[in-house]
Amino acid sequence: MKIIVAIKQVPQRDSSLRPAASGLWVDEANLGYEINEPDAYALEEALQLREKHGGEVIVVCAGPERAQQSIREALAKGADRGIHVETDAVLDTLQTATMLADALRDETADLILTGLQSDDLGYGQTGVVLAELLDFPSSTIIMQVEIDVDTLRVRRELEDGWFQNIEMPLPAVLTIQSGLNKLRYATLMGIKKAKSKEIRVVQPAAPAASTAVIEKVYAPQKSKQAQIFTGDAKTAATQLVEKLKFEARVL
Amino acid sequence: MSVLVVLEAGHRMAGEALTAGRQFAAALGVPLTAATIPADLTYTADGFTAAYEAHARATNPALVVFAHTYQTRDWAPKLATRFRKVLISDVIAARVDSGSPVFVRQLFQGKLNSDVRATGDGPHFVSVQAGAFPPVEAEAPETISLTPAVEPRQNPEKPFRESTRAVDLTAAPVIVSVGRGIKDEGNIPVVQKLADALGAELAASRPICDAGWLPMERQVGSSGQTVTPKLYLAVGISGAIQHLVGMKGSKTIVAINQDPNAPIFEVADYGIVGDLFEVVPALVEAVQRAKS
């Protein structure tokens, strides 16, 4: 069983984000990076499937040189090898998926997992587009994965607390919902082993021009002005409670 | 050339997509058409993609508009890819500028916005965020049937609900809701005390339930419950859209967060910017004083 996990490297969750001087992306100076959280759940699911069915877990990431830190982190958690699609550009989802598809076409994967969306662009479609480009069936927002020889049975999350089980043949692409498993930490042994694991660097072909061009990145305009209470915690809390009692009348 | 609105049969957001489609059609100066696949035809990503691909190739719309639902996310990117386009997803506004459509969409879970221009020839593909456009009653759309020659690879079973909810948050007049800012499962009692002082139900954003710190049935948001209490306190919740759609109808919203730019303050009536581990205990005391 050959499982590929597509991960994205995104700014750390608590990063303070400002538009770049160009206005076309965020200012990347002083940003720390991490594996996009839903992709971390996809990686964990792949590792658990390998524990059950045997085989190999390969992690692929498109991004600049720093993306190798995230690949190394995935290797430390237990992935067997990595593929780094090296690109410095901020790509749209079709461009990213095209590069990933090109890099993966000869891998003859049985299953490709990725997170349901990225925390930065948030388009929520790279996995589905990758499936379309590779002509694999796909299913999204997956909460459970079962494999029986060459058939896949997955639990897809619907809205308002509904679910649906779906069967499809392998190979397939699934986008994974956060929370379907419990994330593991890298062990010291894992970190040590990761240093000698292979990362294949792929130089992608230049992408076709984007048809969804980011022209401007900016702070959202405040539409509703919340009354903000400042000062020390005690003063702010007292002021808030007074407002809740006498203005909003909800206490 | 037209704007084609894809209406998801039986979905509450269908009317929102229609409003967005009308606005986009008016701005582009082209007619509006609407289409749906009837609810009695089984949904599969392969089946819907093939049916709408045939329809779009025959009608050649300038723009195809979807509501950003779970089903849309499952197949609309496939359709867009067949036309070598990106699905410009989850947009909150649009305008026409120098002849081409420019869409506003959020980045970084709502911390920043972006303007995205759809360039080149259509069709372009766009999905609209829940609550971004007011719904209208859908008129009778054109009905599309599935393409018989296409055999979907997905074989879906009947949808089901996991279990009846033991906790009905929708009935609670006051809700204290906790997010990532709580940092550790061991800190949950900090907010539980506030809930107790207020006589409130304790709820959470998705990551807290994902981590198992509170049961899934206490989750508020697009994949949890939608609540409209008279008082909703969001503690350490940044306010990603998936959470906001579940609580922004609350009568009074209070946000406590360390990040003054957190999107939760956009929907809040009152806010305290600060460390929740200092603010919440102070709030417990202030509430107890006010109630005694």
Image (cartoon, helix red, strand yellow):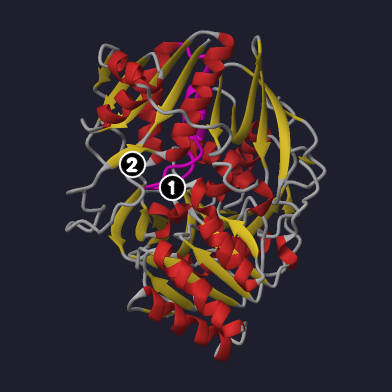
Query: In percent of the image, x 61 and y 58: which residue is there?
Result: B203
* Residue count near mark 1 (Cα–Cα under 10 Å), binned few <14, some 14–19, many ≥20: some
* Quarter of the image where one finds residue B250: bottom right
Along the horizontal axis of the image, is B11 left or right of B112?
A: right
> Is residue A64 on the magenta stretch?
no
Along the horizontal axis of the image, is B187 left or right of A160?
A: left
- Of all chains, the one bearing label 2 is A
* Quarter of the image where one finds residue B252: bottom right
Q: Which amino acid does label 1 sit on?
A: Gly
| Tag 1 residue | A122
Expressed as whole percent of the image width and height from the top left, the position of residue B275 reads 37, 64
- In the picture, the quarter occupied by the C terminus of chain A is bottom right
* Quarter of the image where one finds residue A48: top right
| Tag 2 residue | A10
Disc 2 on helix, strand or loop?
strand
- Of all chains, the one bearing label 1 is A
Write the start and end of the magenta stretch as one range: A108-135
Whether residue B81 is situated above or below residue A220 in the rendered picture: above
Query: In percent of the image, x 55 and y 90: which residue is there?
Result: A247
Query: In percent of the image, x 30 and y 12: which residue is there?
Result: A197
Q: Residue furthest bottom?
A: A246
* Residue count near mark 2 (Cα–Cα under 10 Å), binned few <14, some 14–19, many ≥20: many
Query: In percent of the image, x 45 and y 77: which residue is there?
Result: A237
Q: Measure the alpha-carbon separation of dots 2 and 1.
A: 11 Å
> Is residue A128 on the magenta stretch?
yes
Along the horizontal axis of the image, is B157 left or right of B25?
A: right
Disc 1 on helix, strand or loop?
loop
Residue B143 visible to the viewer: yes
Expressed as whole percent of the image width and height from the top left, the position of residue A205 reads 27, 26
Viewer-proximal residue among B89 and A231: A231
Cβ–Cβ under 8 Å for marks 2 and 1 = no
